[in-house]
Image (tube, rainbow, N blue to C red):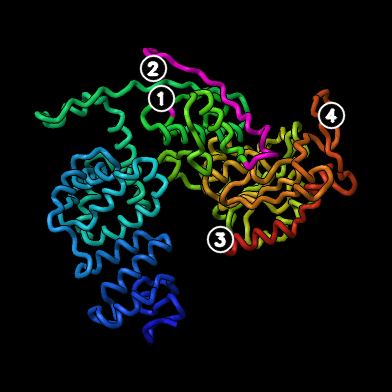
Amino acid sequence: MPAIDCPFRRGSNSCEIVCSIAHLPSVATITDAACEYCSTRATPPRARNKVTCDLAITALRRANQPDAARQLMVANPEFYPPPRDQSGRLATIESGRGVGSQIWRLLASLGIKHTAACRCLAVAEEMNQLGPDGCRTHRARLAATMQKNAASYGWGDVARAAGLALLKGLAWRLNIRDLYGSLIDEGINRAKRAGDEAPAAIAATQPAATTAPATPQAKPRQQLLLTCKLCPGDILTMTAAVESLHQAYPGEYVTDVRTPHGEIWANNPRIEKLSNAAPVRTIEMHYPSIQRCNQESVPFLAGYTEYLGEQLGRPLRLRVNRPYLFLSQEERGRPLSSLWPGAPDLESLAGGRQIWLVNAGLKPDYTIKGWPLEHYQEVIDRTKHLICWAQIGLRKHSHSNLRGVVNLIDGSRPGPPMRETILLAARAAGGLGPVTFLQHLMAAWQKPYVCLVGGREPATWVQYPYQHTLHQVGRYDCCREKSCWRARVVPLGDGDAKDKSLCEHPVTEGLERPAAKCMADILPSEVVLILERVVGA
């Protein structure tokens, strides 16, 4: 029982006052000591005071709402007074080269100037700390914070700033529908350009130091050319290795790639043109960890990263949980109906339903990945009231037309090229299919994907955070102890050695195309249940 009998106490560790301050339905931050202090010594007692505000801030931080916690401190200056002299903080921001500093200078050029008493200094400092990559990751949260703080400037200042942006030629880089997000994008671009300046050029803009020791010359960056000749899904996962390398060793490497499907690398800030004046090390990329994935919990996404670290002779672990893709400003603003010439108006066709992509096709090398076409059709028929399905894929990869979908398979009607497929995935709400390029594509955009795996591959090898993996490992004798890694359901008679890597339990009766038993036994109702839960969330 609590030491103090307080009418606002809920159970053992919650408080109605703290819940009201934090705007949370419940909190778990109350202790007997805090309750006793609030009731007997705080001013005013059992109300909004320093104790209850402290507890509310702690609850918000535990609920992963740092912006709300910061706003609560700003709204209660009697408990959390700002530092008396913040001129040093402002000067540091104004002279810095980070994302926050770049945005502050851009805003100043548009007539919105900050002072030492400005409540936004912490946002600029956080952006400078996060760096370009961190700001890109937290873009939505930072943009929302900027939008909240912008109210203090007044609409007149915003209108004047927009007019000045037109005169300065900045308007084409600022999206009026995503003003604060595009400001962050511009700050990221400027910070990256500033970070690429030679140290001598930067030093020339600073006052000469009289007592500080000279800064040692920066070590020249090693030039790497990374090559790979594999399929789009493999190339897409390779982006995680490049990203992890630069996060682990910032400023130490210049990286370029030679791979098929160069569209995957478009706009990637980690890819730079190599200099002919310096030596270049070429590394052909592989993922040998696939040989251990039945014995160890290793993901495909980490395969290239581990191999790259071994080749460089340096510790290198996977720093991200998804592949990395980047859109240009024009691509972000392109409407769905104009993603490629002849593109359908998916937004109108959807009629308010979510747009999901489905890949029901098969490449001849790994037909064992196929889910029965009849199962795909049942899922589409049972969810068409919730989802506008768009079927994608290359006709050469054995795609049968499904009913009740927007057919985007290349053929008589042109489907999206590679880059436009990437844009389409960025706009879609989710995807359905086997372990294939679409799976990695949806992971890059952090979208849900129902992945039909069966017993061929370990779930730990293919799993992504937003993915629903339906596997059968451990269910049948052929994949009881480990995944089978077989290639085909039945022989195709094309002379390929994969005809000798066949499913032990093929299902050939009653299906339009043969399927492995582990795939055929994944029921459409299982997929429908996931879709209804995800789409209805």
Front: mark 3 or 4 = 4
Name the kind of residue labelled 1 in the image: Val
Residue drawn at 61 percent across, 52 percent down:
356
Name the kind of residue labelled 2 in the image: Ser
Front: mark 4 or 2 = 4
Residue drawn at 75 percent across, 47 percent down:
473
User: What distance separates the C-alpha of mark 1 from that of mark 4?
Assistant: 43 Å
Name the kind of residue labelled 3 in the image: Gly
Name the element at disc 4: helix
Residue on which disc 2 sits = 275
Q: How dense is the environment of label 2, judged by Cα within 10 Å: few (below 14), some, or many (20 and up)? A: few
Q: Are marks 1 and 2 in contact (CB under 8 Å)?
A: yes
User: What distance separates the C-alpha of mark 3 from that of mark 1?
Assistant: 45 Å
Q: Earlier in the sequence, mark 2 or mark 3?
A: 2
Front: mark 1 or 2 = 1
- Measured as percent of width and height from the top left, residue 253 is found at 40, 26
Residue on which disc 3 sits = 352
Asked if residue 294 is among those painted magenta in the image, a careful observer would answer yes
User: What distance separates the C-alpha of mark 1 from that of mark 2?
Assistant: 9 Å
Please, which residue is most extreme toward the right here?
509
Residue drawn at 37 percent across, 45 percent down:
135
Residue on which disc 1 sits = 254
Q: Are marks 3 and 4 in contact (CB under 8 Å)?
A: no
Name the kind of residue labelled 4 in the image: Lys
- Measured as percent of width and height from the top left, residue 524 is found at 75, 56
Screen quadrant of the C terminus: bottom right
Q: How dense is the environment of label 3, judged by Cα within 10 Å: few (below 14), some, or many (20 and up)? A: few
Range drawn in magenta: 271-297
Front: mark 2 or 3 = 2
